Amino acid sequence: IDVKLAEEKGVVVTNTPGVLTETTAELGFTLMLTAARRIVEAVQYVHNGEWKSWGPYLLAGNDVHGSTVGIYGMGSIGEAFARRLKGFNCKVLYHNRSRKEEAEQQLNVEYRTMDELLNESDFVVCTAPLTPETKGIFNRETFKKMKNSAILINIGRGGHIVESDLIEAIEQQEILGAALDVVENEPISDDHPFLKMDQVIVVPHIGSSSIATRDKMVQLCVDNAKQIMSNQDPITPVKLK
């Protein structure tokens, strides 16, 4: 939405922040576990009738417990994600445009530069908003700084990732894989290279898609409209910063 033009035309733009924070973080956590333990591959393996015997490394994945998780973007969703890591005994790092010392104390997270976060993390989780500064932040150079065993999880926006660079990084085994709730062009085309890669999981932008949360989002939309129609201030206006 062109918020600047909307303001010039006297059109009020609202959104639904807050009510979706926990649900979106939960979806990100689900993607991390799913990618780490190769759940999609395992389900397909059974469905294809390939499960004929046992092997000590059959579809062996990576542990999340005891790992190092780096969160890019420590907003409300990033903080909610960090809270979920407490029970997994993870070392949690974060990078944000500004340090959040209160979150560091409350959540036992450690600030890192972007390069440090990439170098140290077993899982890199993007929860940042898409801005001109963050667009394409995950690119060829970024992936070269990550561990060969690292997995990227994106619950921010598709524009954070240069998709051709991600494909190349996985094919060249510069990183292990990715789990994505968002892609650059949605819905994704059925011939997209991501869909041919076992190391990439793509779900259809369902970060906030629980029944309870969608109900809350709809209600907030209605409440905003009622406020505006009653010549009152909207509850959650979107304004240019």
Image (cartoon, grey):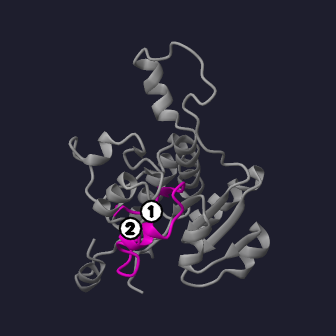
151 to the left or right of 83? left
Local crowd size for mark 1, using a 10 Å CA cut-off: few (<14), some (14–19), many (≥20): many
First to last magenta residue range: 130-158
> Where residue 66 sits in the image (x, y, percent)?
73, 53
Image vertical order of residue 139 relative to residue 98, above or below: above
Give me the residue at 30% from left, 40% from top: 196
Q: Secondary structure at mark 1?
A: loop
- Identify the image quadrant of the C terminus: bottom left
> Where residue 214 sits in the image (x, y, percent)?
47, 47
Give me the residue at 43% from left, 26% from top: 44
Image vertical order of residue 2 relative to residue 203, above or below: below
Q: Is residue 191 visible?
A: yes
Front tag of 2 and 1 = 2
Q: Is residue 75 visible?
A: no
- Identify the image quadrant of the N terminus: bottom left
Q: Secondary structure at mark 2?
A: helix
State yes or no: residue 142 in magenta.
Answer: yes
> Where residue 236 sits in the image (x, y, percent)?
47, 70
Three-letter code, disc 2: His
What is the C-alpha distance between the residues marked 2 and 1?
7 Å
Which residue is tagged 1?
Answer: 156
Quadrant in the picture for residue 49: top left
Circles 2 and 1: CB distance less than 8 Å? yes
Which residue is tagged 2?
Answer: 160
Local crowd size for mark 2, using a 10 Å CA cut-off: few (<14), some (14–19), many (≥20): many
Image vertical order of residue 91 relative to residue 218, above or below: below
Three-letter code, disc 1: Gly
Give me the residue at 51% from left, 43% from top: 210
Front one among 91 and 239: 91
